[in-house]
């Protein structure tokens, strides 16, 4: 299987800094071609969020370049990915907390990471950045770790109320600002002629899943250039609708 890749980030209409960070790396291994995509949203309400997000991105880059080739000498399993990625999250939660304490500042970041192989996908999620799979529709593969998502699940508020709830960005946990982090892991089968998308919450608040699908489904994006152009259209649409957060997105089309 081959992969077409595109990614973009935008500071948005009101922030002074872009606290989002991302990385997407394509790797040729003895088990086939793979992609590791990671997106981190530094906490907008906390100082130096860009340091937290970039630090976690660097940790996953190191894992991709140093550890993944070693794993591919034998086999990749859900247990190994879960253990190693959760270890990264736990270790860097403490490292960022220690850095913040030493500097007298608060900082934190979400984490959404995806390993895409010929046959399977592996996802870790902390916070409210998301991973989508676009086939017949735009399907969210992750689960938001937010107060509003929990209240929706418990039936306290409706999904319609959740979309405009002023607390929608209140996180239950994030790396660097939580006493402990408990990541969510998701696994599934990689689909051909599908688009896998990672995004910060700034990309999805002002546009619908239908609009995402309309611009980024596999039939609309048959080249990386088309993906880049259509991502740009959606970023501008967010800004026109007064999205104030940083906006970041990664797309990977399987073919």
Image (tube, grey):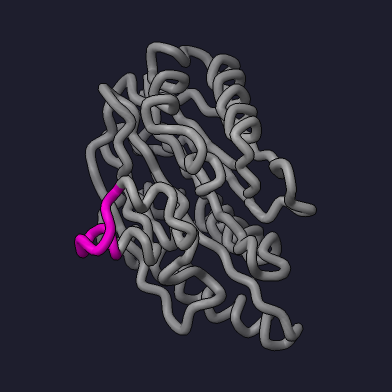
Q: Residue at x 72, y 67 (%)?
A: 48
Closer-to-camera residue (197/78)? 197
Q: Residue at x 43, y 80 (%)?
A: 180
Closer-to-camera residue (77/147)? 147
Q: Residue at x 28, y 58 (%)?
A: 157
The answer to whether residue 113 is seen in the rendering is no
| Residue extending farthest left | 155
Vertical arrangement, residue 77 with respect to residue 223, above or below: below
The answer to whether residue 127 is seen in the rendering is yes
Vertical arrangement, residue 46 with respect to residue 26, above or below: below
Q: Which quadrant holds residue 52? A: bottom right
Q: Which quadrant holds residue 151? A: bottom left
Q: Picture coordinates of residue 206 (x, y %)?
A: 51, 38
**Left or right: 230, with 222 as reference point:** right
Which residues are drawn in magenta? Answer: 151-159
**Left or right: 8, with 125 as reference point:** right
Q: Quadrant of the C terminus?
A: top left
Q: Picture coordinates of residue 5 (x, y %)?
A: 52, 28
**Left or right: 156, with 98 as reference point:** left
Q: Picture coordinates of residue 113 (x, y %)?
A: 45, 51
Q: Picture coordinates of residue 196 (x, y %)?
A: 40, 33
**Left or right: 202, with 139 as reference point:** right
Q: Quadrant of the N terminus?
A: top left
Vertical arrangement, residue 57 with respect to residue 180, above or below: above
Q: Residue at x 26, y 22 (%)?
A: 136
Closer-to-camera residue (149/142)? 149
């Amino acid at each position: 299987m081959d992969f077409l890749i595109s990614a973009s980030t935008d500071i948005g209409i009101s922030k002074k800094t872009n606290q989002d960070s991302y990385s997407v790396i394509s790797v040729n291994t003895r088990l086939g071609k793979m992609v590791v995509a990671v997106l981190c949203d530094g906490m907008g309400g906390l100082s130096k969020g860009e340091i937290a997000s970039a630090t976690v991105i660097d940790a996953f880059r190191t894992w991709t370049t140093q550890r993944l080739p070693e794993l591919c000498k034998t086999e990749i399993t859900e247990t190994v990915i879960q253990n190693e990625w959760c270890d990264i999250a736990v270790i860097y939660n403490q490292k960022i907390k220690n850095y913040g304490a030493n500097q007298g500042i608060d900082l934190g970041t979400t984490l959404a990471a995806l390993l895409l192989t010929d046959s399977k996908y592996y996802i870790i999620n902390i916070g409210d950045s998301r991973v989508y799979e676009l086939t017949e529709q735009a399907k969210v593969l992750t689960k938001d770790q937010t107060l509003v998502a929990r209240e929706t699940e418990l039936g306290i508020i409706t999904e319609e109320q959740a979309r405009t709830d002023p607390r929608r960005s209140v996180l239950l946990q994030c790396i660097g600002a939580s006493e402990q982090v408990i990541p969510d892991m998701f696994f599934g089968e990689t689909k051909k002629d599908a688009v896998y998308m990672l995004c910060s919450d700034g990309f999805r608040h002002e546009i619908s899943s239908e609009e995402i699908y309309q611009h980024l489904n596999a039939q609309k994006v048959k080249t990386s250039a088309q993906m880049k152009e259509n991502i740009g259209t959606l970023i501008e649409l967010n800004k026109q609708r007064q999205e104030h957060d940083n906006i970041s997105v990664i797309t990977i089309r399987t073919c």
